[in-house]
């Protein structure tokens, strides 16, 4: 059975239909990259998966926790959220917490761990994101790449079934992009299940099991990286790839 099943997802903002019937299944261990032009609904799709945005219609099932948008209860939404971990474009770190504190927080507040235990685990995660030596730094003292590695560390701490990445490198200086992509490749090797919105095409080619191209709130086409990147079928995919690769 698929790890996640999304059925007939619809979302509008006023008159603007942003998700127009999305159906999607994600297998455990699968790495799915979503491509698409600005405004095509990629962020909204990720945010609807854990009800950061509330869809009007649709059913989301992650790791056996199902929520129907039409009848959703807060309790089920909170339970669904526990199965996901979100990495934001702008890191969304707590500015008044240190590097270590940002990761510890995920463990104490979300997972209910005792502080000493949480700190031990957070320290191991800091090591694996390569920032053990910055444990006491404030976010304002860290580069964008370092802040995003903390953001990813926080998501790792949640140890969720499904990790959601919304353009994790698009706010970074070009020379910092690789350090975040390298960390994500490390997660890919661990077979974490991930949905990644990115415009980094070589990265997508290397790590994705499947690439999905979205436009106008719909999945236009999907397939293995070679299929979608080298032999796109739809003219919208062809145009998009020409633009991002030029
Ligand atoms: P993408 O991530 O592909 O660039 P988004 O999902 O962010 O696209 O946005 C899709 C459309 O939804 C855009 O037209 C955007 O203006 C609109 N939109 C997104 N979030 C909101 C919001 N909170 N309120 C109103 N409109 C929104
Ligand atoms: Mg977006």
Image: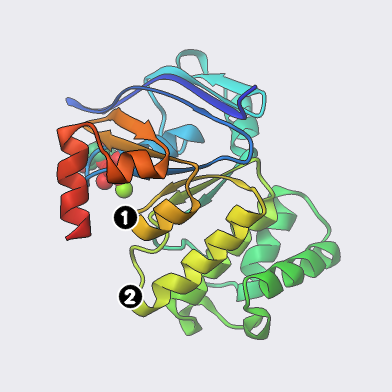
Q: Residue at x 62, y 78 (%)?
A: 131
Q: Residue at x 27, y 43 (%)?
A: 36
User: Tag count in the figure?
Assistant: 2
Asked if residue 135 is positioned above or below residue 6 in the image, the reply reads below
On the picture, is 34 further left or further right than 59?
left
Q: What is the quadrant of residue 64 in the picture?
A: top right
Instruction: Out of 86 and 7, give the one closest to the viewer.
Output: 7
Question: Is disc 2 placed on a helix, strand or loop?
Answer: helix
**Which residue is under mark 1?**
199
Instruction: Out of 222 and 156, give the one closest to the viewer.
Output: 222
Q: Residue furthest top?
A: 71
For the C terminus, give its image quadrant: bottom left
Tell me if I can see residue 67 in this picture: yes
Q: Residue at x 56, y 66 (%)?
A: 183
Q: What is the quadrant of residue 130 in the picture?
A: bottom right
Image location (x, y in percent) of residue 134: 62, 83
Image location (x, y in percent) of residue 28: 63, 35
Instruction: Out of 175 and 134, give the one closest to the viewer.
Output: 175
Asked if residue 229 is positioned above or below residue 199 in the image, the reply reads above
**Which residue is under mark 2?**
174
On the picture, is 197 further left or further right than 157?
left
Tell me if I can see residue 200 in this picture: no
Image location (x, y in percent) of residue 61: 57, 24
Badge 2: residue crowd in 10 Å (few <14, some 14–19, many ≥20): few
> Assess mark 1: CB under 8 A from ligand 2?
no
Image location (x, y in percent) of residue 184: 54, 60
Say whether disc 1 or disc 2 marks the residue closer to the N-terminus.
2
Question: Is disc 1 placed on a helix, strand or loop?
Answer: loop
Q: What is the quadrant of residue 3 in the picture?
A: top right
Q: Residue at x 29, y 35 (%)?
A: 214
């Amino acid at each position: 059975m698929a790890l996640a099943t999304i059925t007939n997802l619809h979302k509008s903002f006023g008159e603007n239909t942003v998700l127009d019937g999305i159906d999607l299944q994600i297998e455990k261990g699968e790495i799915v990259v979503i491509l698409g032009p600005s405004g095509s609904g990629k962020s909204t799709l990720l945010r609807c998966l854990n009800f950061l945005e509330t869809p009007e219609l649709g059913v989301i099932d992650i790791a056996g926790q199902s929520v129907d948008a039409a009848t959703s209860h807060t309790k089920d939404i909170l339970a669904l959220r526990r199965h996901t971990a979100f990495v934001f474009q702008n890191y969304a770190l707590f500015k008044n917490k240190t590097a270590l504190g940002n990761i510890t927080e995920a463990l104490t507040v979300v997972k209910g761990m005792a502080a000493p235990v949480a700190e031990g685990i957070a320290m191991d995660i800091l090591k694996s994101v390569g920032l053990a030596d910055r444990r006491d730094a404030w976010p304002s003292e860290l580069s964008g790449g370092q802040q995003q590695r903390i953001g990813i560390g926080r998501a790792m701490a949640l140890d969720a079934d499904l990790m959601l990445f919304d353009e994790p490198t698009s706010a970074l200086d070009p020379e910092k992009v690789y350090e975040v992509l390298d960390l994500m490749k490390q997660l890919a090797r661990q077979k974490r299940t991930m949905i990644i919105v990115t415009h980094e095409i070589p990265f997508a080619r290397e790590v994705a099991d499947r690439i999905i191209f979205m436009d106008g709130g719909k999945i236009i086409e999907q397939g293995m990286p070679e299929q979608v990147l080298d032999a796109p079928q739809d003219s919208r995919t062809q145009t998009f790839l020409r633009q991002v690769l030029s």
